Image (cartoon, rainbow, N blue to C red):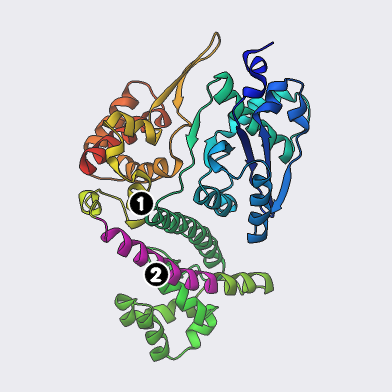
């Protein structure tokens, strides 16, 4: 008989809450301490609550919790960090009501679930029960799980980070569409690249093709009209070369667009012109937000870093004082070589740990410093030294990004 069983009726009132987040509905379960103490596996059949992710669902959850106890301090709650926006409302509600909610890593939950329910397909109810079980083991038996208090992001940092992520996603969408537009121009108007020598997928040439989809239409258009289109697209250096542009259009070797290419060309021009405006407005909004921060001026001169990249660094870092030294900050970024050893493996590879947003931001700064900067800089020298030691580029880059993180830490500090 265990010590807890001998205590019998003297057991403290303690409830363990597990919450599995979903899109349309969440699954929650509360298992009292005395159920776990029985040791008969009854907790594996505990009744779970399926409640919708709405205000009515939160009311159902509160009624379910009150059936066990109306005192939030009697609960120890566990949930997983995944879920993103899906779990924001229920997490905020539980924290506002005073429940002690903690995060547990998905990998640990999966490990415990596979030990308890080997060979059984995963279900949401099973996941919630396992998280409640982990809360009991962590508190009553003393097994160590990595539990982190559930803390919602600061509203200002959260908003800034969300905008910066949207900017990254929008840039990726625009880049893909620009590549497709360039390929179409190579078919329908290959001479355009000799007029717009830097790129045929910027605002100017895209605006031109939106008005004149084929070289024939461009060649037949009045010169003043073409000049006005270029002027409104801010192609001021090309305005006085309209005659040259129309001459290229008259002698173009491009193919007439078939219905499929014509549809793609219309869709791409509309998509690009619309999202060019959205991207400009989004970057302006990000720049206004970060310029209001005192710590922005400390890193504003970081090379090859635009507002979205610096915004991510500031939002994710938050208060740099929470890192007692630069080593902890570098570890938080995840940019350090992880050594993997076994009887058959002995290699160094980039660590998968760390904040992925911060890792991406640092890499976006370090990559041009190493590969595209024409002058000499300490980061390029460090990269070349590591390459000279026999490392591959992906093994040398973590050292560069770690050095960059160290310097940014000291700037913010």
Tell me: 144 left or right of 54: left
The secondary element bearing badge 2 is classed as helix
Camera sees residue 253: no
Point out the tag, 1 or 2, that comes first from the N-terminus: 2
Residue 345 located within the stretch drawn in magenta: no
Position of residue 148 measured from the top left corner of the image (x, y, whole percent): 48, 34
Tell me: 36 left or right of 183: right
In the picture, the quarter occupied by the N terminus is top right
Please determine whether, in this image, residue 82 is positioned above or below residue 105.
Answer: below
Position of residue 110 measured from the top left corner of the image (x, y, whole percent): 65, 30
Separation of marks 1 and 2 at Cα, in angstroms:
16 Å
| Most foreground residue, 6 or 293 | 6
The residue range painted magenta reads 269-293
Position of residue 8 measured from the top left corner of the image (x, y, whole percent): 67, 20
| Magenta segment, prevailing SS (helix, strand or loop) | helix
| Most foreground residue, 355 or 149 | 149
The secondary element bearing badge 1 is classed as helix
Mark 2, residue position: 281
Name the residue furthest front.
Answer: 9
Position of residue 24 measured from the top left corner of the image (x, y, whole percent): 69, 55
Mark 1, residue position: 309
State if disc 2 and disc 1 touch (CB < 8 Å).
no
Residue 270 located within the stretch drawn in magenta: yes
| Most foreground residue, 261 or 397 | 397
Q: Residue at x 30, y 34 (%)?
A: 323
- The image quarter containing residue 108 is top right
In the picture, the quarter occupied by the C terminus is top left
Q: Residue at x 41, y 64 (%)?
A: 199
| Most foreground residue, 232 or 406 | 406
């Amino acid at each position: 008989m265990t010590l807890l069983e001998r205590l019998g009726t003297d057991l403290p009132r303690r409830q363990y809450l597990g919450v599995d987040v979903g899109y349309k509905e969440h699954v929650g379960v509360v298992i009292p301490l005395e159920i776990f103490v029985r040791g008969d596996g009854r907790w594996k059949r505990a009744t779970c609550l399926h409640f919708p992710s709405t205000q009515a669902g939160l009311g159902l959850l509160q009624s379910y919790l009150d059936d066990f106890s109306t005192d939030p301090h009697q609960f120890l709650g566990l949930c997983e960090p995944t879920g993103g926006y899906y779990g924001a409302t229920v997490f905020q509600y539980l924290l506002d009501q005073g429940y002690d909610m903690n995060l547990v890593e998905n990998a640990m939950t999966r490990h415990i679930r596979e030990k308890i329910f080997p060979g059984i397909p995963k279900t949401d109810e099973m996941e919630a029960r396992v998280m409640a079980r982990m809360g009991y083991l962590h508190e009553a038996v003393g097994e160590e799980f990595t539990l982190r208090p559930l803390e919602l992001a600061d509203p200002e940092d959260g908003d800034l980070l969300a905008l910066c992520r949207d900017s990254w996603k929008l840039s990726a969408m625009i880049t893909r569409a620009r590549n497709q537009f360039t390929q179409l121009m190579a078919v329908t108007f290959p001479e355009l690249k000799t007029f717009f020598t830097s790129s045929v997928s910027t605002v100017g040439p895209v605006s031109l093709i939106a008005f004149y989809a084929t070289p024939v239409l461009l060649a037949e258009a009045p010169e003043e009209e073409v000049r006005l289109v270029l002027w409104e697209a801010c192609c001021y250096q090309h305005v006085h070369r309209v005659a040259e542009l129309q001459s290229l259009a008259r002698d173009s070797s491009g193919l007439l667009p078939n219905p499929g290419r014509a549809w793609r060309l219309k869709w791409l021009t509309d998509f690009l012109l619309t999202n060019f405006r959205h991207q400009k407005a989004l970057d302006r909004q990000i720049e206004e937000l970060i310029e209001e921060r005192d710590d922005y001026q400390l890193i504003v001169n970081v090379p090859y870093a635009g507002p979205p990249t610096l915004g991510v660094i500031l939002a994710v870092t938050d208060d740099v004082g929470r890192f007692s030294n630069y080593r902890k900050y570098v570890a938080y970024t995840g940019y350090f070589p992880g050594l993997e050893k076994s009887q058959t493996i002995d290699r160094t590879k980039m660590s998968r740990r760390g904040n992925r947003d911060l890792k991406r931001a640092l890499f976006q700064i370090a990559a041009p410093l190493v590969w595209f900067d024409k002058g000499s800089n300490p980061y390029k020298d460090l990269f070349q030294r590591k390459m000279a030691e026999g490392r591959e580029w992906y093994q040398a880059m973590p050292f560069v990004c770690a050095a960059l993180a160290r310097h940014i830490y000291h700037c913010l500090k």
